[in-house]
Amino acid sequence: MRAPAFLIALAALVVAGLLVLAPAAARADERILAFNSTIEVASDGELTVTETIRVRAEGNQIRRGIFRDIPLVFETAGGRKARAGFDLVSVERDGEEDGYTVNRGGSGVRIYIGREDTFLQPGTYTYTITYRTDRQVRFFETHDEVYWNATGNEWAFPIDRAVARIVLPEGTSVAAHTAYTGPYGASGQDYTSRLEDGGRSVLFATTRPLGPREGLTVVAEMPKGVVAEPTADQELGYFLQDHLGEILGGIGLALVLAYYLWAWWSVGRDPPKGVVFPRFEGPDGISPALSNYVARKGFGDGGWRALSAACLSLAVKGKLVLDDLAGDLTMIRPEGTRGDYAGLPKGEKAIASWLDNRDGSFTVSKANGTSVQKLGNNFRGAIEGENRNRYFKTNRLYLLPGIALSILTIFALLAFGNLSEEQIAIMIPIFMVTFVVVMFAVQIGKAIRRPGGMALRIVFVLVVFSFVTLGHVTASAVLLQLQGEIPPLALIAIGLLAVNFLFYFLISAPTSLGRSAMDEIEGLKMYLQVAEKDRMNMQGAPQMSPSHFETLLPYAVALDVEKPWSKAFEAWLLTAAGAAVAASYAPGWYSGRSFDAHNISGTLGKSVEAMSGTFSSSLPAPKSSSSGGGGGGFSGGGGGGGGGGGW
């Protein structure tokens, strides 16, 4: 019998222990014990709000104190966004002044109450925040109202009891009143209310505890004229205040566009195009590689096609032998040519000199990628160093003021655009992705080698930009709609991107000499890409021959028309020399197994593509970087609101 008695005693101790621990466990829950808010309405429309918040702190989230978020961007009775004023009057803890910090963001303020180096002991604390705000009274045709989110719907803690009192100016009374409880958008009616002070004020109190992110929103209607409506001058000031970001952004965009138009008119307009007629030889003083550089206004593909054309030009002159164009290309300087650079253009001289310093022979392969890179750098440097600003001017320095103005405008949008932290966090990565994608499109546009030149590149990039912009706007609309606002500032920022990228292309322009050279190069290209039968009908066209074909082949490669030029030669060779002689044709500067005399155009076309590809594919991989009232309201509507938490 002693055993049962012992068990009964043990059970009693366990139950007693649980009864003792249960209140302690309950006390360990951080929460808002009471939230009391008094909203005093002045005749000029200014509200003085006093919030008394009694919390239980256990050192979990509430360690130094609490923070209070107060939104300042709200929706007017007319449905547009507006920004209220805010003036913090006092902050107290347990009836005494306490330290605080106010962080102002695009859409509101956050008040941190407490000190960084002071930690609270577990217990109950009462915080009192008093502030003034304006533009919170809503004006209608038949009445005016205060529609106020007393607690806010973003508190991290439950609220045991919430009380809100709206006090109207003296001499008037509340015409109608209502309230809403629950999470944002809910229309719960878990409250009681009563008129006080002869109807001048109305008191609301919740009848159930509010969970985290639940709140109490109150509405009090008043007769017209109790609060003076804003004058025309005040409305203008409010408009400027509400739309300062858009105004500054629009001015900034207009200034950027005006600057770029001025810069384009001053330095970016192309000289008038001359009369283009077929040319049967290379322009005077312009090598094949230089013709590529001039026609493309730079080395759009890294200069590898121009380098291939220069190597072919050296080979045709007997200064170089090319072995196995379709495989690992080997470049060999013939005996007796080393050190002989007489009459060579700068780019070809750079290649010959570079080879001579390597015993006259070099194989282009992945294993020699670093050396190939140096060869490309030497080659491009030689041509650009001699011809920079001679045939065309990039005018890139003229982009800097436009970029600087754009950056200042973006900063103005962020500083004065009334954007919330969430909206900024959403927009920044979207703009970064847009920037990266469009930069990628720019690089592809620069590498386009089809006929059409600059116009085609601009059209290509603008098409890509349009698709990216459409995706950007769609993503912004979806994501920002989740935040309750789709700011027009996003369109201004997109406009800045579009203007900068457009004038990136338009600002460069050929010089008078460059325009003349481009006309001559276009005339040569016209000749190189016509069929043999059409070439024969050209007045003054020279007789086709292996020598004539090989002399102009480097130009054809440089201008990306080696296939039609080779087909014209192939057709002539079959007609003039017969199939037997044509089958035996092989250029003296080429050594390898892949040349097919029966298909000269196909062989040379593939060989040139392989040659250019071999140069670029042999490069070393880039290194990665280190590391309201009337039933239309809801909980969370109106002015006020926000929430808070512990810190």
Image: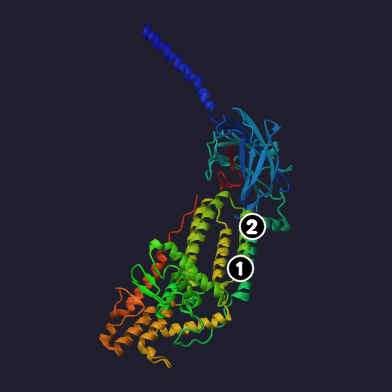
Q: Secondary structure at mark 1?
A: helix
The type of residue carrying mark 1 is Leu
Which residue occupies the foreground of this view, 363 or 456? 363
Identify which residue, 253 or 628, lies in the foreground. 253
Residue 645 in sight = yes
Residue occupying the far front of the picture: 336
**Label 2: element kind:** helix
- The disc placed on residue 96 is none
Q: Which residue is mark 1?
A: 397
Picture quarter with the C terminus: top right
The x and y percentages for residue 626 are 50, 51
Spot the residue most to the left: 580
* Residue 412, numbered circle: 2
Q: How is the image coloured?
A: rainbow
Q: Is residue 179 left or right of residue 5?
A: right
Image height of 222 relative to 240, above or below: above
* Amino acid type indicated by mark 2: Ala
Give the quadrant of the N terminus: top left
